[in-house]
């Protein structure tokens, strides 16, 4: 093990309180920090006990916190909000940062428009009794070049005396993040991918999550730190070593931010480690139909073993077994896969439930791989012990650090990808049902421009939806397939109602979202040869971080998509002149 960094920094909130107690300013002080609400309120109360007036706000999502902490929302009839547009950010940056405010204001009417203010929202509130109030809500940010030389608008701490402009206040959150980036840039890496087995980044951050009263929304500074560190470190490594920044095909090794809560001093420790043992998290099997949490990998393998057919097998980078089955039938072949991105956990349950229903059908002709990325799946199992409701994109990629969809130039290092190749070769499937998920709450990178770079469309959830990717010449059958599957899914009124609830909020905060809604199901269509099969339907379920009935609902939708797609595809294949077998 090699230690790259071990840094503890004073908690900025404590330093601020100490400074103000010594300075005893006469005028009220305002500050914006990366701290949770209870900690900031406690600091204000401590200052007030000494006769000092201070307002300590959140530097992260300041408009949402303004409404939660300083506004009587229940009294409002109408809300009008002007949001700033900055040259160093996407035009919708501050509109999206206000998410999910539209869903938090009850029956009050809410509207947004662009303003000409610098990093400031202007807010007009009209109460049910007809009273009107206006406010300016500052959103502290700084323009800087980031870790790959891109100019970004970065969230930052701030301090000012009331009525003045004030100045940036370098916070503990920012200091820890930037120290990690500097450690990556200054270390001498070997010039061959992967650069390491595992890069572990342990951060102790004194910030508690805040659950919001809308779907699975939560405000989490610890999760934001995980996400920004994971993608920024990958981008920094790839740029430093000459690869394309952040692309899923790069293979730096496994990057693992492990963000822990603490009541003590903020700290970061970065180490380069060998994989060591490749054990797996153990646990009892649970009934799949009512599974309210991700299955253990041992149960997944056991469920696969019950499916009659030819074995599909591969070995991961860490040495874990990837398992699948090929069942021959008289109908057109279909590949059913999930767990490509292992933090998307409803797909394996839905895939297994669907194939168990199909297994007794002599016409059913399929190959199934329920968890393609077994190393990532085990990493996710370990990470959710500390933070069960975080999205953990560290588990998205393989232990090589790449995405399974990208082509591997070296045929001797395909590892778990060999399972998909074998499944396609055995089955000859022309349709790939690729079950995925995405975050059930907002996904941000506050130190790197706020919106997740390269994944901007995914920053806020939009319900359960479908993506069709068709090779040229396969568009017509693909169009018929996705349309009929969406129609059949719409029979689930709970699913349609859930989608409508999320889409109503998306319409306010991301009005230019690039999808159409068919029968209550968002759909995206693409013509591309990116995927091996000429037809690919990708499901996207809001399954990252959900449990209980929400998790059951997501794997119900995954299962039903597979069953509907197989049914529709059988008929379309018989009517088609395309080479389908």
Image (cartoon, rainbow, N blue to C red):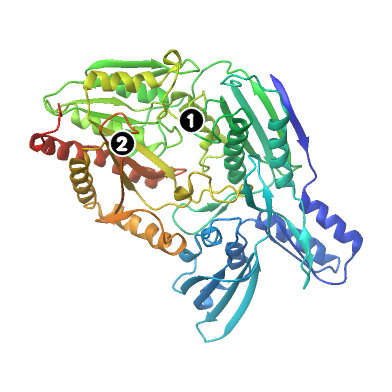
- Which mark identifies residue 350? 2
For label 1, the residue is 397
Answer above or below: position of 227 versus 323: below
Quadrant including the C terminus: top left
Q: How many marks?
A: 2
In three-dimensional space, the C-alpha distance between marks 1 and 2, rounded to whole angstroms, equals 21 Å
- Residue ID at (86%, 65%): 50
Observer-side mark, 1 or 2, equals 1
In front of the other: 459 or 564: 459
Q: Is residue 13 left or right of residue 137?
A: right
Looking at the picture, tell me which residue is in the foreground, 34 or 14: 34
Side of 87 relative to 270 (left or right):
left
Residue at x 53% of width, y 81% of height: 126
Relative to 418, say whether 371 is above or below: below
Percent x, y for residue 104? Answer: 49, 65
Image coords of residue 284 (percent x, y): 42, 27
């Amino acid at each position: 093990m090699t230690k790259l960094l071990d840094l503890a920094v004073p908690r900025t909130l404590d330093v601020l309180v100490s400074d103000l107690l010594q300075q005893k300013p006469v005028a009220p002080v305002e500050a914006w920090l990366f701290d949770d609400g209870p900690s900031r309120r406690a600091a204000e109360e401590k200052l007030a006990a000494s006769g000092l007036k201070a307002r300590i706000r959140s530097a992260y999502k300041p408009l949402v916190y303004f409404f939660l902490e300083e506004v009587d929302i229940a009294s409002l009839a109408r809300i009008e909000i002007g949001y700033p547009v900055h040259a160093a950010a996407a035009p919708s940056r501050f509109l999206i940062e206000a998410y999910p405010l539209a869903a938090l204001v009850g029956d009050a009417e809410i509207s947004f428009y662009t303003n000409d203010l610098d990093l400031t929202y202007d807010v007009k509130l009209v109460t049910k009794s007809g009273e009107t109030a206006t406010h300016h809500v500052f959103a502290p940010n700084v323009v800087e070049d980031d870790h790959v030389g891109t100019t970004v608008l970065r969230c930052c701490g701030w301090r000012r005396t009331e009525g003045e402009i004030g100045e940036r206040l370098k916070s503990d959150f920012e200091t820890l993040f930037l120290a990690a980036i500097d450690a990556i840039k200054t270390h001498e890496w070997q010039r061959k991918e992967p650069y390491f087995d595992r890069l572990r980044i342990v951060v102790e951050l004194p910030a508690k999550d805040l659950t919001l009263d809308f779907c699975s929304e939560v405000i989490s500074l610890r999760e934001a730190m995980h996400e920004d560190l994971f993608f920024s470190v990958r981008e920094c490594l790839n740029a430093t070593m000459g690869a394309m920044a952040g692309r899923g095909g790069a293979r730096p090794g496994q990057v693992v931010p492990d963000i822990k809560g603490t009541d003590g001093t903020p700290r970061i420790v970065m180490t380069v480690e060998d994989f060591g043992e490749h054990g797996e998290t153990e646990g009892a099997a649970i009934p799949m139909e009512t599974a309210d949490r991700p299955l253990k990998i041992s149960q997944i393998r056991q469920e696969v073993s019950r499916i009659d057919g030819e074995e599909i097998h591969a070995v991961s980078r860490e040495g874990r077994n990837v398992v699948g089955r090929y069942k021959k039938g008289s109908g057109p072949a279909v590949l059913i896969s999930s767990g490509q991105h292992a933090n998307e956990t409803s797909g394996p349950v839905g895939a297994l439930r669907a194939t168990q229903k199909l297994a007794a059908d002599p016409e059913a002709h399929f190959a199934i791989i329920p968890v393609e990325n077994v190393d990532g799946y085990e990493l996710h199992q370990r990470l959710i012990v500390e933070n069960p409701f975080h999205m953990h994109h560290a588990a998205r990629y393989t232990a090589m650090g790449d995405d399974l969809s990208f082509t591997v130039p070296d045929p001797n290092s395909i590892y778990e990808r060999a399972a998909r190749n074998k499944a396609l070769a055995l089955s000859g499937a022309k349709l790939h049902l690729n079950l995925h998920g995405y975050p059930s709450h907002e996904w941000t990178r506050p130190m790197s421009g706020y919106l997740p770079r390269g994944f901007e469309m995914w920053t806020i959830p939009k319900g359960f939806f479908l993506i069709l990717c068709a090779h040229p010449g396969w568009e017509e059958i693909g169009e018929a397939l996705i349309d009929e599957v969406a129609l059949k899914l719409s029979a689930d009124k709970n699913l349609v109602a859930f989608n409508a609830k999320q889409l109503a909020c998306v319409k306010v905060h991301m009005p230019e979202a690039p999808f159409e809604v068919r029968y209550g199901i968002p759909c995206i269509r693409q013509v591309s040869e990116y995927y091996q099969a000429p037809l690919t339907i990708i499901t996207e379920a809001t399954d990252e971080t959900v449990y209980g009935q929400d998790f059951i609902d997501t794997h119900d939708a995954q299962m039903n998509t597979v069953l509907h797609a197989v049914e529709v595809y059988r008929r379309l294949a018989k009517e088609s002149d395309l080479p389908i077998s």
